[in-house]
Image (cartoon, rainbow, N blue to C red):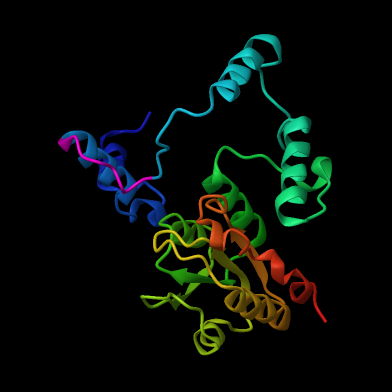
Amino acid sequence: MPDGQDKARLVSGGGFNPVLSAQPRTIFDVMSGLARELNAVNLGQGFPDEDGAPDVREFAAKSLMTDSNQYPPSPGLLELRQAVADHYRRFQALELDGPSEVVVTSGATEALAAAILGLIAPGDEVVMFQPLYDAYLPLVRMAGATPRFVRLEPPHWRITPEALERAISPRTKLVLFNNPLNPSAVVFPDEDLRLLAEACVRHDVIAVCDEVWEHVVFEAAATRRWWPCRECASGP
């Protein structure tokens, strides 16, 4: 049991991870709390307008009663991994092997944490585009890496070759790329995707692509994905 001095240190923050204890309260928590308090429309967090399709919820409830509701395999249920692979084949023309190339996580932020902590070693550098999702920076710092930022400017939020090359160095290990970009909501044009893909190939940099909003776009932009540039991302 901690003694009085240990307890005081914990309360003051001295006993916690310095990277995490230095993080402010997440803006999503702040905005959602204010929306509840003031009975306001919450534009600060991506809550759905409805509870979801009844048939999907009914199937989920039935599955809890008829299928296993205990610990799943650590990479996720095999049938779910195969369904994810089928999804990428349908929407992005990617051929993935569900059993060996898909991992199911509890939300996108856990997937990002697993990818970042699994790929980065202390001393590496990670390129990120501002404005950015607030989980990126603490995850990168937890891994012991140095963040390098590319500041995108309104109103078009375009990636420029000059800004990208300034951010990449021989120590760059990966690029965190969010498309559509949260919180600016921009959907990157194919020219920017090709620019980034070619830079990753040229510098031997891994791209971690956060496309959690890929299906929440207007129809005209629905085909703009990272992977239309896969022919250049695969190398010369």
Q: Does 176 appear above or below 56? A: below
Instruction: Give the quarter of the figure containing the C terminus.
Output: bottom right
Instruction: Please report the residue visible at 51 percent of the width from the left and 55 percent of the height from the top.
Output: 217
Measuring from the top left, give residue 24's x and y in whole percent.
30, 53
Which span is picked out in magenta? 38-45
Measuring from the top left, give residue 53's x and y in whole percent.
54, 27
Task: Judge whether residue 105 can be spotted in this image.
Answer: yes
Quarter assignment of residue 29: top left
Residue sitting nearer the eye, 147 or 55 = 55
Task: Judge whether residue 14 can be spotted in this image.
Answer: no
Residue sitting nearer the eye, 96 or 114 = 96
Instruction: Please report the residue visible at 47 percent of the width from the left and 59 percent of the height from the top.
Output: 136
Viewed as shown, does residue 134 lie left or right of 61?
left
For the image, the number of numbered tags is: 0
Q: Residue at the left extreme?
A: 38
Viewed as shown, does residue 220 lie left or right of 199?
left
Instruction: Please report the residue visible at 42 percent of the width from the left and 31 percent of the height from the top.
Output: 50
Quarter assignment of residue 118: bottom right
Viewed as shown, does residue 105 lie left or right of 147?
right
Prevailing secondary structure class for the magenta stretch in the rendered image: loop
Measuring from the top left, give residue 19's x and y in whole percent.
41, 57
